[in-house]
Image: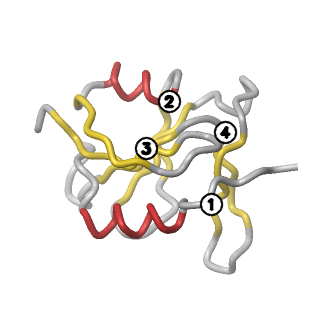
Amino acid sequence: MSEMMKVLYIQAGKKPQVIEIRHTLSEMQRLVGGTISSFMPFNDGSVIILNDNGKVDGLPLNRAVYDKNGEIADIIAGDFFICYAAPDSSEFSSLPDELIRKYSELFKIPQIFI
């Protein structure tokens, strides 16, 4: 396991940014502001790491995730990041450059929910 991991960090109301973080649970929890949960809505190995209690704690709604029909599947509350998990591994790793480009574009525009 590498000590550092390149992720796409998406804060509520801000554009995505590529950052390097220490590959530790405490660092992941610090980024999302609490207990982490993983969410894999895409079929490309990318993993959304979010605050497990974001909605319950009333964190600001950040971005919507859409299903294959273009319907909102979920709305992520609070800051989150996207990393990678190879199909044959239970470890998180750096997000490959092509997926950084894909999700930087997908989550480029901060959303406002009413």
Residue at the far right: name it.
Answer: 114
Q: Nearer the viewer, mark 4 or mark 3?
A: 3
Q: Which residue is mark 2?
A: 32
**Which residue does the image show at 37% across and 58% down from the upper left?**
46
Which amino acid is tagged 1? Val
Local SS, label 4: strand
Mark 3 and mark 1 lie on one chain; the one further toward the N terminus is 3
Is residue 88 left or right of 38 when viewed as pictured? left
Give the CA separation, mark 2 to mark 1: 17 Å
Q: Which residue is mark 3?
A: 9
Local SS, label 3: strand
**Rendering quarter of residue 28:** top left
Does the residue at mark 4 contact the one at mark 1 (Cβ under 8 Å)? no
Q: Nearer the viewer, mark 3 or mark 1?
A: 3
Q: Position of residue 102 (x, y in %)?
A: 41, 69
Q: Where's the N terminus, which quadrant? A: top left
Image vertical order of residue 108 relative to residue 76, above or below:
below
Q: Which residue is mark 1?
A: 65
Mark 2 and mark 1 lie on one chain; the one further toward the N terminus is 2
Mark 4 and mark 1 lie on one chain; the one further toward the N terminus is 1
Which amino acid is tagged 3? Tyr
Which amino acid is tagged 4? Ala
Image vertical order of residue 81 relative to residue 88, above or below:
above
Local SS, label 1: strand
Q: Which residue is mark 4?
A: 77
Give the CA separation, mark 3 to mark 2: 9 Å
**Rendering quarter of residue 96:** bottom left
Mark 3 and mark 2 lie on one chain; the one further toward the N terminus is 3
Mark 1: few, some, or many residues within 10 Å (few <14, many ≥20)?
Answer: some
Q: Position of residue 22 (x, y in %)?
A: 23, 29
Local SS, label 2: helix
